[in-house]
Image: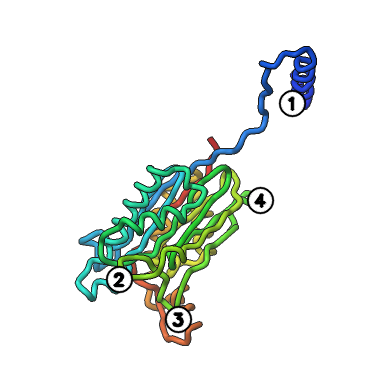
Amino acid sequence: MRPSLNYLRQLRNQIVWSASAIGLTTLTQTNFCTTKEYYFNYGSHMIPHPEKVHKGGEDALFTDKKILVVADGVGGWAELGIDPGLYSKELCKKLEEAFKQNPEDLKNPKKYIIAAHKVTKAKGSTTVCVVALNKGELKSSLVGDSGFAIYRKVDDKYQLNFKSQEQQKSFNFPYQIGSEGDNPNVATDETHKIQVGDLVVLGTDGLFDNMSAQQIQVVIEDVIKTEPNNPQALAKSIANYAYRLSLDPKYNSPFAQHAKQSRLRYMGGKSDDITVIVAFIHEQ
């Protein structure tokens, strides 16, 4: 019969007390409590706007087992002859560098946004969303309307646990950082309780303007029936579904619903770059 953990703890404490009583000071206790360390098992998929396929779109991303990033270059810069993708892509590279130089800042990914903004030299601006794993918690920071959702398995089905809120100044006018834009200190700073098996979905507005969190949940349930642990297949399925909806002129999209709330007339999906990252949370 194997001794219980409780019995072993009691035995350890008795040994430590006895050693102390006879003056043995070199004996140390074993710590039975360990901090959980999580990592992302991730996949991603990008679909450029139909008119931007030749240059790969204006979205950008960075992925690692500890941190995930999406960014969406603000399209208005094209009217000034500046490629909106230049800033978002450079910012993601600088975010990657900041993470590798200071991995301890996973506890506050807002610091990565501020640091990357400081050294990004391209003209333009972008929205951005960062999520990171630190000591058993999910840390998040975002600017604008790029965002994320957390899904958790309940009764063997994934259900929405959390959805980030957009930062908008007015309809279709998100907060943004860049060579001109908002102070990066506007970035949010949040902590989320997570569990092994949770599913995180990051996306630029090309995803969330065309699919609600509930619609994403339906795709998740459909895909995991045949691909139970394949984040790449899931990211591709979600992105493809959002793309089809973006081209439907009669679809009452989330974007159309938000337009109506602002007393504007709009119907159909919103054609845009679509970037999706899907990550299962695993324990090391």
The answer to which of marks 4 and 2 sits earlier in the sequence is 2
Q: Is residue 154 left or right of residue 99?
A: right
Give x and y (percent) for residue 239: 39, 59
Mark 1 or mark 4: which comes first in sequence? 1
The tag on residue 206 is: none
What residue is shown with label 3?
A: 259
Q: Quadrant of residue 248?
A: bottom left
User: CA gap, disc 2 to disc 1?
Assistant: 59 Å
Q: Quadrant of the N terminus?
A: top right
Q: Is residue 226 visible?
A: no
SS class, disc 1: helix
Residue identified by numbered label 4: 155
Three-letter amino acid code of the residue under disc 1:
Leu
- Secondary structure of residue under mark 3: helix
Rendered location of residue 87, percent (x, y): 29, 61
4 vs 2, front mark? 2
Residue type, mark 3 in image: Ala
Query: Which label was assigned to residue 75?
Result: 2
Q: Are marks 3 and 2 in contact (CB under 8 Å)?
A: no
Q: How many marks?
A: 4
Q: Is there a contact, CB below 8 Å, between mark 3 and mark 4?
A: no
Other-residue count near label 1 (Cα within 10 Å), few / some / many at <14 / 14–19 / ≥20: few
